[in-house]
């Protein structure tokens, strides 16, 4: 593994994007920053701008209206970078199973390449940490190449 | 003398490389102590180094409609400024008889460069939030710069008008450090408050305000230029406390045990910075302006007057 990717996996800066979620997952994600779980141990911090981010963390169900914005944000993330989808909604529609708004966009793979899905409604903070650690130990195959997805 | 000596001094010791390593370590300590104060474990001490390496390996995105070369050059202005300050300070510390008349003034000028590069890069970013951040940074420079200079006039008055860093160090070695007098104490406190604003830390991180305008001037930066900004900030965290130690607390000497005493001075000042940062909320820009031109200014003028009457 190159130095570049090694440094990347040890200092993940996370941009949190909530797309029409019920905010349960978001609360669990903020729980990761509290003293109990303290995700900064792994060098992860929450950043405010997508331009700083290495991880695009998506919660909630991506519907028709959200789709162009999710794509835009993915394009704005400096590569190499990861995409982490938290919650059952992103992977299997969750409680929006029969909605007409999510037919083209679920699972999230249809919109942008996803590295890790963390299922659960909402997943426990431990599960999210576990997902990220699995992503790190997968080591050095971030999906995001510049030519990956057309907007 | 070796003709390449100034270049080596600028790039390796005591310039860029040395300052960068110690500065990154200092910001690692900052993050660790902050975490401990919040009952967290916190990142390892070398985390800032990893961050810099990672940012250097990432893609640099250019915003639409910005002057591209200008956008990429502005971070380097601040880096060059802080490196030069550090070189001048350490050369004077290693041998107080080197240096030129007026290097104190040169250092004061060069210390404005990092803030200036922030302002310029914000306006080069073509982003409304960056412009807001830049205008705030300009107001902040206007507010803290005058008390800071007044506070540093005090050691100059004490030495009878010596404008060299080496002269101030020599005077303190002969007659005792500046903070042993009443005017010195007041000026030192004023300088610490202004240092907090110069470092852009809470409560004076108004220009960057991560939770409000998302990094302000540096919002559009990614990859290597962002790494340069982070590096400049880390190096400032090392350089400005050293500047205050040199002018107020007698500098750092390299003879045996007194080196330990010198390191203790720096760590003490760093802990003060971290404690101020962790126990205060962010001020609004008008509050900061009123604070600096009101209370701090009065204290600074008082210190100068006391110094003129030899207290």
Image (cartoon, coloured by chain):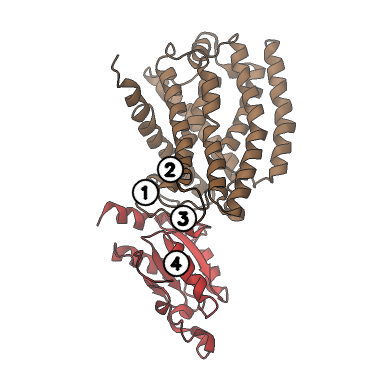
**Mark 2 crowd level (few <14, some 14–19, many ≥20, 10 Å Cα):** some
Chain that appears brown: B
Secondary element at tag 4: helix
**Mark 4 crowd level (few <14, some 14–19, many ≥20, 10 Å Cα):** many
Residue occupied by mark 2: B228
Q: Are marks 1 and 2 on the same chain?
A: yes
Residue B256 is situated, as x and y percent measured from the top left of the image, at: 36, 19
Query: How much space separates mark 4 and mark 3, taking CA atoms?
Result: 12 Å
Residue B215 is situated, as x and y percent measured from the top left of the image, at: 55, 51
Secondary element at tag 1: helix
**Front-most of residues B123 and A107:** B123
Query: How much space separates mark 1 and mark 2, taking CA atoms?
Result: 9 Å
Q: Are marks 3 and 2 on the same chain?
A: no
Residue A116 is situated, as x and y percent measured from the top left of the image, at: 38, 71
**Mark 1 crowd level (few <14, some 14–19, many ≥20, 10 Å Cα):** some
Chain that appears red: A
Residue occupied by mark 1: B56
Q: Which chain does the residue under circle 3 lie in?
A: A
Q: Which chain does the residue under circle 2 lie in?
A: B
**Which image quadrant: the N terminus of chain B?**
top left
């Amino acid at each position: 593994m190159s130095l570049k990717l090694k440094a990347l996996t040890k200092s993940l800066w996370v941009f949190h994007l909530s797309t029409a979620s019920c905010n349960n997952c978001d609360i669990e994600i903020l729980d990761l920053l509290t003293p109990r779980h303290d995700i900064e141990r792994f060098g992860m911090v929450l950043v405010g701008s997508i331009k700083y981010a290495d991880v695009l963390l998506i919660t909630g169900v991506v519907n028709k209206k959200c789709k162009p914005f999710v794509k835009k944000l993915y394009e704005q993330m400096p590569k190499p970078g990861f995409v982490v989808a938290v919650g059952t909604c992103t992977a299997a529609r969750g409680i929006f199973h029969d909605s007409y708004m999510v037919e083209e966009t679920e699972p999230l793979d249809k919109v942008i390449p996803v590295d890790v899905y963390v299922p659960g409604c909402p997943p426990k903070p431990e599960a999210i940490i576990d997902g990220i650690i699995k992503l790190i130990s997968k080591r050095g195959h971030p999906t995001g190449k510049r030519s990956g997805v057309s907007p | 003398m070796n003709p390449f000596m100034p270049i080596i001094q600028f790039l390796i010791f005591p310039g860029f490389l040395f300052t960068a390593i110690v500065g990154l370590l200092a910001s690692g300590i900052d993050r660790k102590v902050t975490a401990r104060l919040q009952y967290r474990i916190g990142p390892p001490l070398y985390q800032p180094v990893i961050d810099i390496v990672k940012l250097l390996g990432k893609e640099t995105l250019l915003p639409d409609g910005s002057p591209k070369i200008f956008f990429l050059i502005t971070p380097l202005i601040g880096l060059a400024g802080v490196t030069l300050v550090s070189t001048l300070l350490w050369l004077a510390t290693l041998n107080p008889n080197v240096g030129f008349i007026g290097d104190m003034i040169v250092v004061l000028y060069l210390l404005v460069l990092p803030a200036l590069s922030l302002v310029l890069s914000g306006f080069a970013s073509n982003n409304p939030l960056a412009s807001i951040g830049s205008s705030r940074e300009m107001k902040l420079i206007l507010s803290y710069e005058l008390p800071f200079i007044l506070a540093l006039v005090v050691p100059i008055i004490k030495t009878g008008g010596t404008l060299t860093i080496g002269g101030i160090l020599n005077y303190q070695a002969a007659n005792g450090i500046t903070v042993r007098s009443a005017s010195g104490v007041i000026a030192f406190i004023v300088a610490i408050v202004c240092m907090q604003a110069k470092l852009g830390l809470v409560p004076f991180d108004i220009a960057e305000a991560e939770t409000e305008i998302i990094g302000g001037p540096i919002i559009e930066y990614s990859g290597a230029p962002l790494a340069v900004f982070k590096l400049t900030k880390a190096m400032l965290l090392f350089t400005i406390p050293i500047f205050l130690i040199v002018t107020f607390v007698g500098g750092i000497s390299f003879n045996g045990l007194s080196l330990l005493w010198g390191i203790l001075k720096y760590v003490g000042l760093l802990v003060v910075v971290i404690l101020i940062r962790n126990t205060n909320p962010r001020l609004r820009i008008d509050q900061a302006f009123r604070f600096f031109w009101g209370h701090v200014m009065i204290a600074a003028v008082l210190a100068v007057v006391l110094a003129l009457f030899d207290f």
